[in-house]
């Protein structure tokens, strides 16, 4: 059910394309290709550690996505100044209407995650590559950004009943977020399985009660209270904004 943006009854697309989304996605893809070209030219990168670090980057991307997702589900409200309407509301709205994201186009789906991946893709340019440690760190950041920018795409596929064949194959093998795994997050109290890239971190983070501890620590340190409602839901759809969880 790979549904593209659907025209509304007024003939307007339901998910109007935002220039920032297009720039973010194309910019992130450009940076990934630049890293691939630069790394491939260095003989030191043709080493057995390279694929290991690239896979660790996917694990790292899932962790950062989980933290951002938890933050979006837990703190503030849709009325919070600056970030409420634009960033928090889509997280909450997704719980009320999870299938709405299937209507979104490619750039709207991936715009926010590509934007949040840009710092990870820019950091490697600041890291000296003269040592093995520097090269591994640079590659790790590039891999986190390169994988992380597709988090919303993986998340969208996890909501499809019939995703493309190759995607279903990757989901079955646990290489990317599966429908079964993500379904657990969509059950009240919406407080487990925050990982929406692969879900690899969830078992461990759930077992050590990572987010409950983090929540307690944030309240202790700042006095801020997490959401009081048992279900982080917003029902009013924000028109002209990204409808999806960003990560
Ligand atoms: Zn959520
Ligand atoms: Zn979801």
Image (spheres, grey):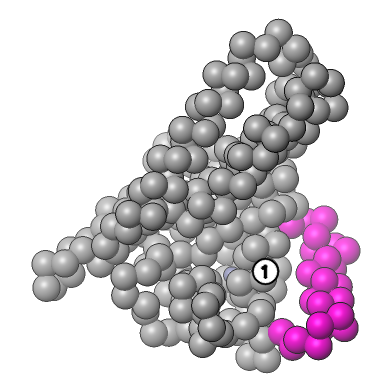
Q: Residue at x 61, y 14 (%)?
A: 40
- Report which residue position mark 1 lands on: 70
Q: Is residue 207 rendered magenta in the image?
A: yes
Position of 148 relative to 6 (above/below): above
Q: Is residue 38 left or right of residue 114?
A: right
Answer with the quarter of the image where residue 181 lies: bottom right
Label 1: few (<14), some (14–19) or many (≥20) C-alpha neighbours in 10 Å: many
Looking at the image, which residue sits at the far top?
43
**Residue 34 location in percent, x, y?**
53, 26
Specify whether residue 53 is in view.
no
Magenta span main SS: helix
**Residue 5 location in percent, x, y?**
26, 58
Which of 161/112 is in front? Answer: 112
Which of 31/238 is in front? Answer: 31
Q: Residue at x 40, y 65 (%)?
A: 242
Q: Residue at x 50, y 48 (%)?
A: 114
Position of 50 relative to 3 (above/below): above
Q: Is residue 74 rendered magenta in the image?
A: no
**Residue 84 location in percent, x, y?**
52, 79
Helix or strand or loop: what does disc 1 sit on?
Answer: helix
**Residue 38 location in percent, x, y?**
59, 19
Position of 2 relative to 78 (above/below): above
Specify whether residue 72 is in view.
yes
Ligand 1 resides in the quarter of the picture at bottom right
Position of 52 relative to 25 (above/below): above
Q: Range of the magenta residues?
A: 202-226
């Amino acid at each position: 059910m790979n549904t593209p943006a659907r025209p509304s009854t007024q003939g307007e697309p339901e998910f109007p394309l935002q220039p920032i989304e297009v720039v973010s996605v194309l910019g992130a893809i450009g940076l990934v290709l630049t890293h691939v070209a630069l790394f491939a030219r260095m003989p030191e990168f043709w080493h057995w550690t390279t694929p290991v670090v690239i896979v660790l980057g996917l694990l790292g991307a899932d962790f950062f996505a989980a933290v951002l997702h938890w933050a979006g589900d837990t703190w503030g409200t849709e009325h919070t100044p600056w970030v409420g309407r634009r960033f928090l509301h889509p997280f909450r709205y997704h719980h009320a209407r999870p299938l709405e994201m299937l209507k979104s186009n490619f750039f709207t789906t991936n715009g926010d995650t590509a934007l949040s991946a840009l710092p990870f893709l820019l950091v490697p340019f600041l890291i000296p590559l003269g040592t093995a440690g520097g090269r591994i760190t640079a590659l790790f950041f590039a891999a986190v950004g390169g994988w992380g920018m597709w988090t919303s795409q993986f998340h969208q596929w996890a909501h499809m009943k019939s995703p493309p064949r190759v995607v279903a194959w990757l989901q079955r093998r646990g290489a990317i977020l599966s429908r079964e795994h993500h379904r657990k997050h969509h059950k009240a109290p919406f407080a487990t399985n925050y990982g929406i890239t692969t879900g690899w971190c969830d078992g461990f983070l759930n077992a050590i009660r990572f987010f409950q501890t983090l929540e307690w620590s944030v309240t202790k340190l700042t006095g801020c209270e997490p959401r009081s409602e048992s279900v982080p839901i917003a029902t009013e759809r924000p028109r002209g904004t990204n409808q999806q969880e960003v990560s």
